Image (cartoon, rainbow, N blue to C red):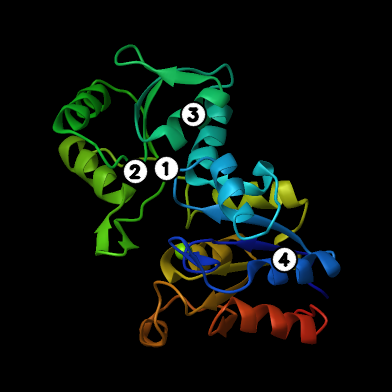
Amino acid sequence: MKFKSIIFDMDGVLWKDQTPLTNLKNIFKKLDAASIEYAFATNNSTKTPVEYQKKIALFGVQISPEQVITSGTNLASLLKENYPTGGPLYIIGENGLVDILKDYGFYYEESSVLAVAGGLDRSVTYEQLKKATILINNGSPFYFTNPDPSYPSPEGNIPGAGAIKIAIEAATGVKAITPGKPEAFMFLNALKYLKSTPQETLVIGDRLDTDILGGVRTGCKTALVLTGVTTSIDLEVSEIQPDYVFQNIDELITTLEDSDWEIIT
Ligand SMILES: [Mg+2]
């Protein structure tokens, strides 16, 4: 059987911050030539799919916003399933999350809310943590985009969405419903867009605990690239093991192309 589609993580796979890790135009040209469908899945909720479309266009690659699933669009789709008519939410998050929730019919309120919905907010305050805590203590359901406690930056590892989530969990004793990676929900959303089955889909990422674990849980083949968070030493000692390991995205795509996109089992 051949691969029909690919779900890409982005940071640490395609680029590091603003620097592309290869000639991305060439990579996607190869995929297009082989009629491989692709989608992008990121736990970063601070940017919207349109912002990602613009970022990838800077590297010469044209995609549509529908191809991008952020942990923000992913959470919005879960909330829409649970609250089909939309409504008020207490939101902790940046514009990337607030704008997407708005697209799905949800808006910011501080009382009488359907739920508390959180994501990474790099200007979060004690007052926001307090409001969320009181609402949850009074029975509001608690949702969060993704669990990553930290993420890499040019200054070193810095607090991620999970660090804010854990603060509210500690204050309330309530665990957040968190549908981002490594939950299968995120990958199933990508598969829905791709109209592909897990068996014919490859998940590519740089993190074992989110990308690779999520791909495994969904039943996809998984490929780790060593250009991001995970080192070969991390890989050696981890219980989470990908199907394939490559030094970088170039090596991965070239190998797939040379094997005519055949799935090695
Ligand atoms: Mg990554």
Mark 4 and mark 3 lie on one chain; the one further toward the N terminus is: 4
Disc 3 + disc 2, Cβ < 8 Å: no
Residue placed most toward the observer, 64 or 239: 64
Mark 1 and mark 3 lie on one chain; the one further toward the N terminus is: 1
Check disc 4 and report its element: helix, strand or loop: helix
Residue 55 relative to residue 193: left or right:
left
- The tag on residue 28 is 4
241 vs 136: above or below: below
| Percent coordinates x, y for residue 58 in the rendering | 59, 55
Tell me the amino acid under the disc marked 4: Phe
Check disc 1 and report its element: helix, strand or loop: loop
How far apart are the two marked residues, 1 and 2, measured between alpha carbons? 7 Å
How far apart are the two marked residues, 2 and 4, measured between alpha carbons? 30 Å
Mark 4 and mark 1 lie on one chain; the one further toward the N terminus is: 4
How many neighbours does mark 4 have within 10 angstroms: few (below 14), some (14-19), or many (20 or more)? some
Residue corresponding to mark 3: 99
- The tag on residue 46 is 1
Residue occupying the point 41% across, 44% down: 178
Mark 1 C-beta to ligand 1 under 8 Å: no
20 vs 251: above or below: above
Tell me the amino acid under the disc marked 2: Leu
Tell me the amino acid under the disc marked 3: Asp
Disc 1 + disc 3, Cβ < 8 Å: no
